[in-house]
């Protein structure tokens, strides 16, 4: 006697489970990568192509780089690029050093109030920057940091997320390594620099990517601190471009793609450390 297979068992089979996973991944890829591909397509379209055609036309009929040339000729985008690169590079280096230095005692030293400090650190991550914007701005003005690179760097110099992330990474290192260094007479600062940091390179690379993306895409803080075009970063430059050419979305798309290229390059060089560092810096009590 033949047995009939239940439809529910078909959906629960291994190949169906794999199919659902691939379908979910394809949907996620379409949601995340799709807008960028449309932006790239728009930046490569010529003036004779309709950007709002229905159904949408994904591939340019005659791809051209004239939009990028016009963007560079009408706006000092290379100046904006240099400003963003300088601010992002300094911010990333400072965040890696200061965040890991602050995370070291939270992860490896026992002192009164350590848990309370860690709880306050976690609580500070829940406070949006918009609530702190006015006092931070008043502090920057008082210190004379308006229209300066230092003023752009300081909010990113040491982040609560960076301290939390590096604390988790340090806790994954066996204590025997640190104890062996202490028995050799090595000081705490030397242990942090020569022992722990080399063992957390993947986590440092992951934090560098997070810090670089946050600093590179920061728009609100430069907007309220900077009013001289000589100090504009790329987000401010793209906003200025959008205000100047609000009717020509090809140029706006070209400027946006121009600002995203350094992020893709930076991630391309650090991607082999990124996943490993993100996993190692994940939750551990």
Image (tube, rainbow, N blue to C red):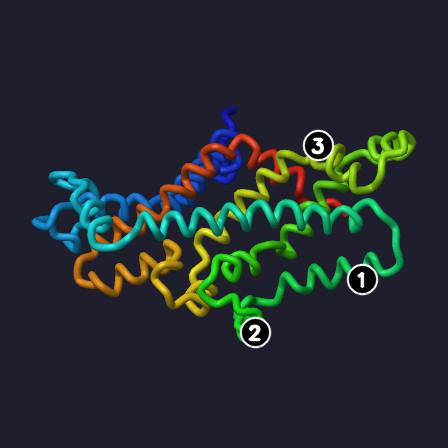
Name of the residue lying farthest toward the top: 1
Q: Which mark is residue 216?
A: none
Instruction: Report the mark closest to the observer, 2 or 1.
Output: 2
Nearest to N terminus: mark 2 or mark 1: 1
The kind of secondary structure element at disc 2 is: helix
Nearest to N terminus: mark 2 or mark 3: 2
Question: Callout 1: few (<14), some (14-19), or many (20+) C-alpha neighbours within 10 Å?
Answer: few
Residue at (64% x, 50% y) in the render: 162
| Separation of residues labelled 3 and 1 (CA atoms) | 27 Å
Query: Where does residue 152 sit, x and y in percent of width and height?
Result: 50, 59
| Separation of residues labelled 2 and 3 (CA atoms) | 40 Å
Q: Which residue is mark 1?
A: 116
Q: Is residue 129 above or below residue 19?
A: below
Query: Where does residue 62 sit, x and y in percent of width and height?
Result: 12, 39
Q: Which residue is mark 3?
A: 199
Q: Is residue 100 above or below residue 9?
A: below
């Amino acid at each position: 006697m033949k047995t009939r297979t239940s439809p529910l068992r078909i959906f629960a089979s291994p190949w169906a489970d794999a199919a659902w996973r691939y379908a979910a991944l394809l949907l996620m890829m379409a949601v995340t990568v799709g807008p960028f591909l449309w932006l790239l397509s728009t930046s490569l379209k010529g003036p004779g192509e309709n950007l709002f055609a229905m159904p949408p036309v994904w591939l340019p009929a005659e791809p051209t780089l004239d939009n990028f040339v016009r963007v560079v000729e009408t706006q000092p985008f290379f100046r904006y690029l240099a400003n963003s690169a300088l601010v992002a590079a300094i911010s990333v280096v400072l965040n890696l050093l200061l965040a890991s230095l602050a995370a070291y005692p939270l992860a490896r030293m026992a002192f009164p109030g350590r848990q309370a400090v860690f709880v306050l650190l976690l609580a500070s991550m829940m406070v949006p920057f918009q609530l702190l914007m006015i006092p931070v701005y008043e502090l920057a003005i008082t210190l004379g940091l308006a229209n300066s690179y230092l003023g752009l760097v300081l909010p990113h110099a040491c982040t609560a997320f960076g301290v939390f992330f590096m604390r988790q990474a340090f806790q994954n290192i066996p204590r025997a390594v640190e104890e062996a260094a202490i028995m050799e007479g090595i000081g705490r600062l030397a242990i942090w620099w020569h022992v722990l940091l080399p063992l957390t390179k993947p986590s440092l690379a992951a934090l560098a990517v997070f810090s670089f993306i946050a600093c590179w895409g920061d728009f609100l803080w430069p907007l309220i601190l900077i009013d001289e075009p000589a100090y504009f970063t790329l987000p401010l430059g793209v906003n200025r471009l959008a205000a100047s050419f609000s009717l020509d979305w090809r140029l706006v798309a070209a400027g946006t793609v121009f600002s995203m290229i350094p992020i893709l390059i930076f991630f391309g060089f650090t991607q082999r450390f990124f996943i490993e560092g993100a996993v190692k810096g994940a939750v551990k009590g």
